[in-house]
Image (spheres, helix red, strand yellow):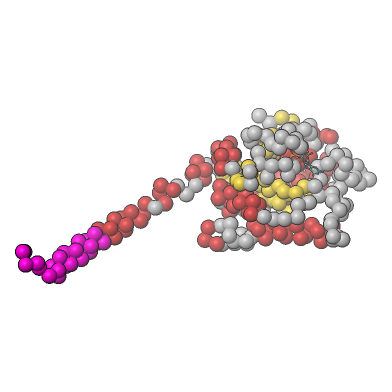
Amino acid sequence: MAREWTGIQNFPLATQTKLLKLLTTLKEKERDSVTILVMGKGGVGKSSTINSILGERAVAVSAFQSDVPRPVMVSRERSGFTLNIIDTPGIVEGGYVNDQALELIKRFLLNKTIDVLLYVDRLDSYRVDNLDKQIIKAITDSFGKEIWHKGIMVLTHAQLTPPDCLGYDEFFGKRSEALLKLLDSGSLFRKREVLGHQVPVALVENSSRCNKNDNEEKILPNGTAWIPKIVEVITEVATNGSNSIVVDQKLIDGPNANERGKVFIPLILTAQYIFVGLVKKWIKDDIAKAPKSSWE
Ligand code: GDP
Ligand code: MG
């Protein structure tokens, strides 16, 4: 059951006005609910981002015990519109994707429809490595590459001073480019296809020390009020014409390993039959060719 979205009243008036306008836009497009799935490594700021967007402490945040142990869905209702946000535990453990954690998430999502995926990472990390690739691949393998048509790359810790005399926009450009390149690298997908779709990027600063504008709205170093901005991007993605991802049993089971090889069984049996026949013939020929000993 969805609770009334009272957190919206905690925002400065300017933000409230923009958010309510976006909800109206969604309702005009005949959307009366949006379900957002939030995924990413542990400790990157998934739960904090959810709380920031809702304007209330809806899910637990912790600097140390890095994560919620299981997925949770928070639902909020506002003038006939329902916003569902699903927080998930990070799917990485000891440097690898934890398949069990992934299974838990998939089972939680059964019979739900994902309208938007927030893939969360930090803006202030400098490298894109094999682990990032593994996570993106795990998400792609779980939900299909179409999920990225519903994806937003969310970068937290956005209030930073870039290193090496780089300008803010330049740094942001380089960091997001590296992550988007990973998405489009082709190695993620079966058949080496590329995504061919630009995933939008949204910046987030969850810290209470985030700078504010004259309207008391939290702003990024480039002056953008980021909460209405990310909700705007969510609205665009939710209504971008690509299909939402319906999580059914078939999707969860994936391309069934038992089924996959079945078509080859008759082929293999035939090959085996022919091969055994050949070997038998060779042995027979060999015996026939061998010089007979005198005692024979
Ligand atoms: P999760 O494991 O991905 O859900 O990450 P959390 O939301 O629990 O955040 C982990 C830690 O990072 C907490 O101490 C948060 O306060 C902190 N944190 C999250 N987002 C930001 C951010 O945008 N800026 C800063 N400075 N800290 C953040
Ligand atoms: Mg969390």
Residue 75 x, y percent position in the rendering? 69, 34
Residue depicted at 68% across the width and 48% down the height: 119
Magenta portion: prevailing SS class: helix
Residue depicted at 62% across the width and 61% down the height: 185
Q: Quadrant of the C terminus?
A: bottom left
Residue 78 x, y percent position in the rendering? 74, 35
Q: Is residue 40 left or right of residue 51?
A: left
Q: Is residue 190 above or below residue 48?
A: below
Seen as rendered, the residue at the extreme left is 295
Residue 283 inside the magenta-drawn segment: yes
Task: Determine the image quadrant of residue 114.
Answer: top right
Q: Which residues are magenta?
A: 274-296
Residue 121 inside the magenta-drawn segment: no
Residue 186 x, y percent position in the rendering? 59, 61
Seen as rendered, the residue at the extreme right is 214
Residue depicted at 57% across the width and 37% down the height: 104
- Residue closest to the eye, 291 or 260: 291
Tell me, yes or no, if residue 33 can be seen here.
no
Residue depicted at 55% across the width and 62% down the height: 192
Tell me, yes or no, if residue 249 can be seen here.
yes
